[in-house]
Amino acid sequence: MRKKIVAGNWKMNLTLPEGRTLVDGILSGLPTLNESRQVVIAPPYTHLTQTGEQLDEYEHIYLGAQNCASETSGAYTGEVSAAMLQSAGVQYVIIGHSERREYFNEDDALLARKVEQALATDMQVIFCCGESLEIRDANAQNEYVEKQLKSALFHLGDLLMKRIVIAYEPIWAIGTGRTASTAQAQDMHEHIRRVVANQYTPLLADEMTILYGGSCKPSNAAELFACPDVDGGLIGGASLKAEDFLGIVNAMMGL
Ligand code: PEP
């Protein structure tokens, strides 16, 4: 069964009290979720325990982290391991966000190690991919995204690959207010599913959740999510206001 997911990535925003208020606001308006309609909230590391406690009694809304270490443990000052995240109640880890790739020089080889670390626990991975405007203008986005997936994910066996959610996030649409058109999103999501089907099996590809990310908001979410290969969204800016985030969650519920 292919799951629909709306995941909020708070990035480096909100203090602990602000985070608590936001989660309270989301929970107070949350529709009834189920196995096939799920929500993930990915606050900063410092907020994980608090947010996890708030989500504790709710079903099908999960705690996410925005990153994890590429090593298991040891002298890596400032890093947080996958096992630590799991022990804090985290169920999803975002890996490969374009901001991590760009500002923290995370390359495909490092991301492959992070994915392995996360999957060595029982967490699931939201793996981000997506091209720059330059690559899109050169019409080379399909090959570019395919290479990102191959380099960081395609060494995984079927069982591990089943625990991957892919988020297609064109860099030119992240935080810019410029959204991919439904045709651009659908074309890329279909391409990603085809590439996964060729590497694995058509069934595995069909059941894989592929999220869209990039200036998704309540006013465009329903249209994007109506694309046959778009299974929800990874939401940045609009995940910071309960009303906006709930508007996007409700768009998913209407699918
Ligand atoms: C993101 O950073 O994952 C994202 C999609 O951001 P925004 O929704 O703000 O474009």
Image (cartoon, grey):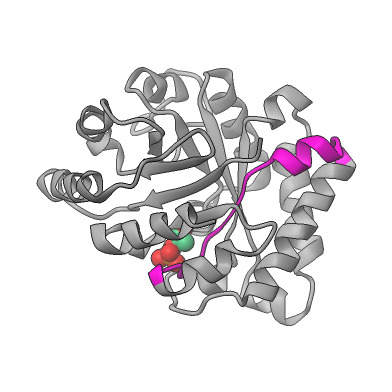
Q: Position of residue 81 (x, y in %)?
A: 43, 25
Left or right of 243 in this view: 219: right
The quadrant in which the C terminus is found is bottom right
Residue located at (35% from left, 23% from top): 89
Give the extent of the magenta segment. Answer: 199-218
Instruction: Locate residue 230: give its quadrant.
Output: bottom right
Instruction: Locate residue 54: give its quadrant.
Output: top left
Left or right of 246 in this view: 152: right
Answer above or below: position of 144 versus 60: below
The reply to whether the magenta stretch includes residue 208 is yes
Answer above or below: position of 234 versus 173: above
Residue located at (75% from left, 29% from top): 156
The reply to whether the magenta stretch includes residue 56 is no
Q: Position of residue 64 (x, y in %)?
A: 40, 37
Left or right of 72 in this view: 218: left
Residue located at (22% from left, 45% from top): 23
